[in-house]
Structures are given as structure tokens and as C-alpha cells.
Image (cartoon, rainbow, N blue to C red):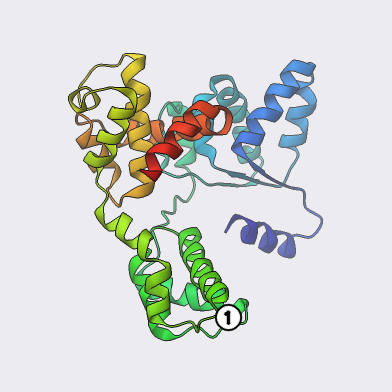
Amino acid sequence: LLQAACKAYMERNPGHRLLYTSCEEFVNDFISAVQRGDVAAFRQRLREVDFMVIDDIHFLARAERTQEEFFHTFNTLYNAQKQIVLSSDSAPAEIPSLEERLISRFKWGLVARLDPPAYETRAAIINKKAALRGIDLPKDVAEFIARNVESNIRELEGALTRVLGYAALTNKPINLPLAQESLRDIMQFRASVSIEEIAKVVGARFNIKLSDLQGKRRSKSIVLPRQICMHIARRLTDYSLKEIGGFFGGRDHTTVLYADDKVAELLKTDSHTRGIVTEVQTQ
């Protein structure tokens, strides 16, 4: 959607200056500019654009000094009547550790919530993806995938790729029995996993009681395993943020979002945490 917005903008405004980046890259560029003593050039590059698009703006929550810099950049562009488009995995008020003044400014514009696609949309997407690969997908196969994969487009496409790959490897026609066979383990696992089961596996891995994970203690030895539980629960279950937080001692949705982001960041740099999460998810 962000790329489509950029394309449409440039078609309507040829010659305008556009910046399209991720929040993580924005933060890294700012840190590099500070280290080089070149913050002025960084500011000039940002504040002279006509259209600024930043993906995953929620990552700004953990960078206090960068929040200050982005606040002034936002004000400069807004006052100059430039276009700003931001994406996030949650609403402005639900981003943990984000300054109140940034939250208020994010609310100045149009806040559009994107829900998971409905069944009919999922089926249409699957058929479109198959058609792009030159495959005439049987209707019952598309409906089967659409009924069982509900979370996001990436998982839909992954399920379709798995069905097509299984058909190619076994040299069998694409039909409902083949789709059921190729996706059997995914469907069974998603149908049976629960937050409690995830918590028990994580607790056993860290030698922590379930009551500790659900309790109020915030010692480092408990906080990380609890955060890992929340991260995995967001990916392997269909429970809401409120339900996940409720299971872990009545914590609110912002705590779950923070835990999810925290573990996601650790997975990029910490091989130990990455190994633990992979181990838990495969049990």
C-alpha cells in the first residue's frame, strides 16, 4: 500500500521530491549522522522533501532522541503543507513509550485501520496469486485455504506456495485432497495450540513456573521469558492482544505490543534468543 501511494503521488506530481524509508533505517541514519557530526545535513535532506513515507513508525518508541528529531521534522513538513504517510502495527495511542506530543500529531491526519481480509477477499487474493503464476486453481482449493489461513497476506501466499510446491514434487494434480495433505500439519497445529501450552513450553525451557509467568514479578529472569511467550502467542494463535495480556496477569495490550517488538528486535541480533524461540515454536 505504501509503494502504491508513492507511485500514485509521483504520477500526479512529477518532479516532486519523495522519501520512502523504514523507521529502523530512519533511526540508524540519525545515529550515524550524530556520530559523524553531520546532523544538519540529515535534517536538510528530510525537511526538503514533498512527500515523506515511513514504514513501521512504532519502532520510534524505543529511540527517545530520535523521537525529538522526528517531532521537529514532522512539524516542519506539516507546517509547509507537505504530505506525510506513516504505517504502524497499532493505532497511535497504542504505541508504547511514544511521546504524547507525537501521538497527538499522528492523530491530526487520517488514521485508517487495516483489518485482516474477510473470507471472500482471501479467496480472491489466492485466486489472483495463482493466476499470476499461470495456475487455474480449483475453486474448492482456494476456498479451503481461505477458510483456514486468516491472519495475513503473507501466510496466504505461503500456504498457496506450499500447495503448488507439493503438487510439483509429487507430480499430482492440484485438488482438495492434495491441499489438505500438504497443509495438514499447519492446520492441526494452529487449531490445537493455546497460550497456556506456549507458556508451559517456555517455562520448562527457562525453568520457570507458570504462576511466575502470570504473576506481577518483573525480574529480568522472568520478564524475557514472559515477553517470548507473548511474541510467540501473537504469531501462533488467533488470540487478541487483550486476551494474551489477560492470560499473563491482566497486562494491557500495550505491554503485549512492547513485548512482541522487543523480542522481534532481539531475534535480529541475538542468536541465543533466536535459538530459544525457534526451539519453542517447533515443539
Residue 60: x and y, percent?
53, 31
Q: Is residue 169 above or below residue 226?
A: below
Residue 53: x and y, percent?
63, 46
Taking the image as drawn, is residue 150 in sight? no
Residue 101: x and y, percent?
46, 28
Compare residues 194 and 126 and report the one nearer the observer. 194
Label 1 belongs to which residue?
Answer: 131
Compare residues 74 and 254 and report the one nearer the observer. 254
Residue that protrudes farthest toward the front in the picture = 170
Mark 1 crowdedness (10 Å alpha carbons): few <14, some 14-19, many ≥20:
few
In the rendered structure, the answer to whether residue 31 lies left or right of residue 230 reads right
Q: Amino acid under label 1? A: Ala
In the rendered structure, the answer to whether residue 186 lies left or right of residue 83 reads left
Residue at coordinates 30% horizontally, 42% vertically from top-left? 241
Q: Is residue 88 above or below residue 29?
A: below
Quarter of the figure that contains the C terminus = top left
Residue at coordinates 33% horizontally, 70% vertically from top-left? 147
Residue that protrudes farthest toward the left in the picture = 211
In the rendered structure, the answer to whether residue 46 lies left or right of residue 271 reads right
Residue at coordinates 28% horizontally, 47% vertically from top-left? 240
Residue 229: x and y, percent?
33, 34
Q: Quadrant of residue 143?
A: bottom left
Compare residues 200 and 76 and report the one nearer the observer. 200
Taking the image as drawn, is residue 221 in sight? yes
